[in-house]
Amino acid sequence: MSITVDEIFETASMTLYQNLDIRTTTLGINLKDCIDSDFRKFKEKVYDRIYSNAIKLIEEAKKLESKYGVPIVNKRISITPISLIMETHSTKKKYLEMAQTLDKAAKDAGIDFIGGFGAMVQKGMTKADKKLIDSLPEVLSKTDRVCSFMNVGSNVSGMNVDAVNLLGATIKQISLQSKDAIGCAKFVVMVNAPEDNPFMAAAFHGIGEPDFSLNIGISGPGVVKSVVEKNKECDLTQLSEIIKRTVFKITRAGELIGRELAYNMRIPFGIVDISLAPTTAKGDSVARIIEAFGIESIGTHGSTMAIALLMNAIKKGGAMASGNVGGLSGTFIPVSEDAGMIEAVNKGALNLEKLEAFTAVCSVGMDMFAVPGDTPSEKISAIIADELAIGIVNNKTTAVRIIPVPGKKPGQSVNFGGLLGKAPVMKVNKYSAKDFMRRGGRMPAPITSMRN
Amino acid sequence: MNKVKELLFITVIGKDRKGIVAKVSGLVYECGLNIEDISQKIMDGHFVMTMMVDMGDSKYSLEDIREKLEKLGRELDQSIQIQHENIFKMMHRV
């Protein structure tokens, strides 16, 4: 046998006991050619394009799950940023109708989430963009599977603080209109958004993409935790090597399945994003990896470095394994989706400031965290602005998915169920940046933007 | 004419007990799979049996075979996995 028993055991154990999975397979679909001056026809074309391809995606994904014994947890669709195709139909009513069309196509086909209901506004907002933002509270409360993003800055354009201010107020509105503020879990504000990101809520099919593109997000915090636990005595260099080797293997599995899926669907293969993404399932936590390193609780001193080490090893292992590694590869640290993170907040080991610090060394940003419902909108904008400044200055993607929970205070929590998990409400700094944020305008791009 | 081989690995993990190889082999025969290689070993305190099978001649779909194996796994109190050989080649060979 060319493959040894040890190797077979290792792979089978990853799938049987350590939650190795393809976290998401996301089909990017160009919708630009569906644009029609007749809005009814436009919606029909969008529905048909999405539904027919989504069915194919699910069918082919199921075959490969069986062939390789690796679960493909989510099947998702990302579309051309909606602002681009709706510019001539930009009324609140039509935005809602289009969102409902997308939601229906996703539900009818069995797609978990559909992303791309957003805009790129890093330099400024068009009238249509503003209308789109205006429609979001209603869109996100009246649909279940539509995800929205707003890219409000980049390395080369700086940060559109006017948009950040508007979005702070919009997020408050979303939280008030949707049950338990769940609409906020489907909305992300970001900078340096990659055009081929397979992960929600930020996925969209960028304008530089072909008609279709298949992107894979592979996960497996349990696999990494398991090898870390088996190597308690090695130093950090060796630990990094061990993680690299493991990540190499799981990325190869993602590459294999992604390529085959794209081939079977006769569409181009996009990227593999190897990001450890937790779920609240037992053993599927990124925080527990950090704790297995020897840190008492994630959030204490030393955990930023631990995440930096983990990120570095993941990126290097992934880069060797695939020629198409996605820009976000690393690890996600959403609070509500990770049992270890939730516990750390509840026992006071992890606060908002430390969460922000983590994002300077890891992908992607401050994700799925709840704050008290009475947090003023300008404070929400300031939290977002701080996080996005880290991305702009450090040439990386950062994003914020913040959930102000009406009527809730620190110490309480909100339960979304499923993959979105349970978010403990975190304490925010009581002092204000209102006068600073009120100035508006644009934060200029860093000097590193002048590379030409 | 020789059919193209379609090689898969069946992994059985659990406590060592009588009849595992016999039962799994029996099911493999019923499904029309040909056993190409078989190994067993104790690893991390587990009994591990791996079987390389060719499903080129089988009239069953992989999904059916997976279902039958999982059912047998529950009866024998063993975890049983079946995976196409490509995943092992990709993960363990550069």
Image: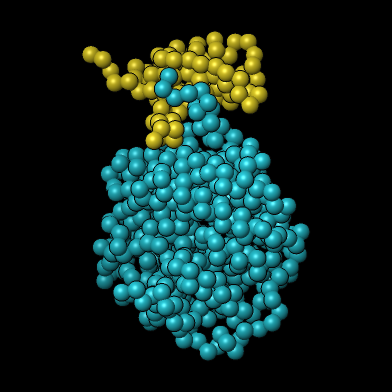
Taking A61 as reference, is A287 left or right? right
The C terminus of chain A, quarter of image: bottom left
Q: Residue furthest left?
A: B1
- The one nearer the camera, B22 or A80, is B22
Letter of the cyan chain: A
Residue A354 occupies quadrant: bottom right
- The one nearer the camera, A149 or A363, is A363
- State whether residue A451 is above or below residue B11: below
Letter of the yellow chain: B
Q: How is the image coloured?
A: by chain
Can you give x and y, in whole percent of width and height, for residue A283 in the image? 64, 43
Residue A371 occupies quadrant: bottom right
The residue under the point 67% across, 58% down is: A302
The N terminus of chain A, quarter of image: top left
The residue under the point 44% across, 47% down is: A318
Total numbered circles: 0
- The one nearer the camera, A123 or A213, is A123
The residue under the point 48% across, 15% down is: B38
Residue A285 appears in the picture as rendered: no
Residue B3 appears in the picture as rendered: yes
Can you give x and y, in whole percent of width and height, for residue B66 in the image? 48, 26
Can you give x and y, in whole percent of width and height, for residue A68 in the image? 44, 33
- State whether residue A185 is above or below residue A375: above
Taking A263 as reference, is A237 left or right? right
Can you give x and y, in whole percent of width and height, for residue A304 in the image? 62, 60
- State whether residue A94 is above or below residue A223: below
The residue under the point 34% across, 73% down is: A451
- State whether residue A77 is above or below residue A320: below
